[in-house]
Image: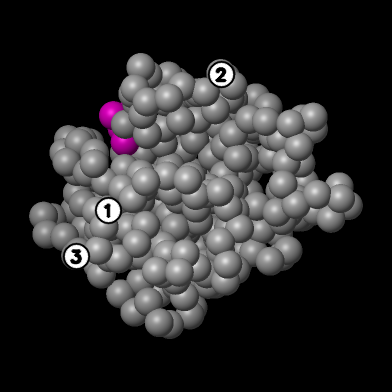
């Protein structure tokens, strides 16, 4: 499968891939700056979602997280910082028996996520809630979910290149909540022994693991993500258990690209909508 995104990052940078494809009815395959919103397809057209044409658009890390997290039959799942709702859509497709709640602080993004639920006829299984993870107790009851996922803002407010687009600023930088806020919100939402999975820059792995433990979410599964084999990791996927015992399983690394800049078999399958059984990357669930 060929690379359909604009990977211009150096090895070690988090993959910024916009993996959605604009529907052909627009006559284009990529968003136009003149359009405020696009209707895009996911999983080779199986799902559709609305996204901003100029603001935040989902990337590969969201799909990697959805594929990584452990979900069981009839689990109640919550996605903290759901954005356009891509993770709830993916999880609802993977697991027909679960329900998912997405929490999003930005009204326009929450509205687009709700429109996508209507379009995909998933209102009975996915709910989008407007709210701030820093005030999680005002949004939901404590210990009401078996699984939490989060793809939180990666960057500190003053670090890196800051987009002039406010929606992108909030999605990428810790303006409306930092790592500690998201992890403590996850701990509040989880039942005892519930699971929380998060994707984060590999360079901040120690911060992530320490903050998880401080929030009583013991890291149990870890997987490094590399742009190419033989280069430093760009992302880390970690799943922890609330009140769990110490001891973690470190999975085989995940590589995004082959040497010819095509996606690896596992990543290509993930983008197409296959759920990979991690620990046995050659299998399909």
Report the residue marked by disc 1: 233
Q: Which comes before the other along the chain, label 2 or label 1?
A: 2
Question: 179 or 117: nearer the eye?
Answer: 179
Q: Are marks 2 and 1 in contact (CB under 8 Å)?
A: no
Helix, strand or loop at mark 1: strand
| 8 lies left or right of 220 | right
Report the residue marked by disc 2: 164
**Residue range highlighted in magenta:** 180-184
CA distance for labels 2 and 1: 28 Å
On the question of residue 159 being in view, the answer is: yes
* Circle 3 crowding by C-alpha within 10 Å: few under 14, some 14–19, many from 20: few
Question: 252 or 234: nearer the eye?
Answer: 234
Helix, strand or loop at mark 3: strand
Determine the residue located farthest toward the front in the rendered image.
260
Image spot of residue 215 (x, y percent): 22, 36
Tell me how many marks there are: 3
| 220 lies left or right of 100 | left
Q: Are marks 3 and 1 in contact (CB under 8 Å)?
A: no
Q: Which residue does the image show at 69% across and 39% down from the upper left?
A: 51
Image spot of residue 7 (x, y percent): 49, 49
**Which dot marks residue 249?**
3
| 141 lies left or right of 97 | left
**Which dot marks residue 59?**
none
Image spot of residue 79 (x, y percent): 49, 43
Q: Which residue does the image show at 30% across and 74% down from the upper left?
A: 279
Q: Which residue does the image show at 34% across and 62% down from the upper left?
A: 228
Name the image quarter holding residue 203: top left
Q: Which residue does the image show at 37% across and 46% down from the upper left?
A: 10
On the question of residue 105 being in view, the answer is: no
Q: Was residue 192 drawn as part of the magenta stretch in this picture?
A: no
* Circle 2 crowding by C-alpha within 10 Å: few under 14, some 14–19, many from 20: few
């Amino acid at each position: 499968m060929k690379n359909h995104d604009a990977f211009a990052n150096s090895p070690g940078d988090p993959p910024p891939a916009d993996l959605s494809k604009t529907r052909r009815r627009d006559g284009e395959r990529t968003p136009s700056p003149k359009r405020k919103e696009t209707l895009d397809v996911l999983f080779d057209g199986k799902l559709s979602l609305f996204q901003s044409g100029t603001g935040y658009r989902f990337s590969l890390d969201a799909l990697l997280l959805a594929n990584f997290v452990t979900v069981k039959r009839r689990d109640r799942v919550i996605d903290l910082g759901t954005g356009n709702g891509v993770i709830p859509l993916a999880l609802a497709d993977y697991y027909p028996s679960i329900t998912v709640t997405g929490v999003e602080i930005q009204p326009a993004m929450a509205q687009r996520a709700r429109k996508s639920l209507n379009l995909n006829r998933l209102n009975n299984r996915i709910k989008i809630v407007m709210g701030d993870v820093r005030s999680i107790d005002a949004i939901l009851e404590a210990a009401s979910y078996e699984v939490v996922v989060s793809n939180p803002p990666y960057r500190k407010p003053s670090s890196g290149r800051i987009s002039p687009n406010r929606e992108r600023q909030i999605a990428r930088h810790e303006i409306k909540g930092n790592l500690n806020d998201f992890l403590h919100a996850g701990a509040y939402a989880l039942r005892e022994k519930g699971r929380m999975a998060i994707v984060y820059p590999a360079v901040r792995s120690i911060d992530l693991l320490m903050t998880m433990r401080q929030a009583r979410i013991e890291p149990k599964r870890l997987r490094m993500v590399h742009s190419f084999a033989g280069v430093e990791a760009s992302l880390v996927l970690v799943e922890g258990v609330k009140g769990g015992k110490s001891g973690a399983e470190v999975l085989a690394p995940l590589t995004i690209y082959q040497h010819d800049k095509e996606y690896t078999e596992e990543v290509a399958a993930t983008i197409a909508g296959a759920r990979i059984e991690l620990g046995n990357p050659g299998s399909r669930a």
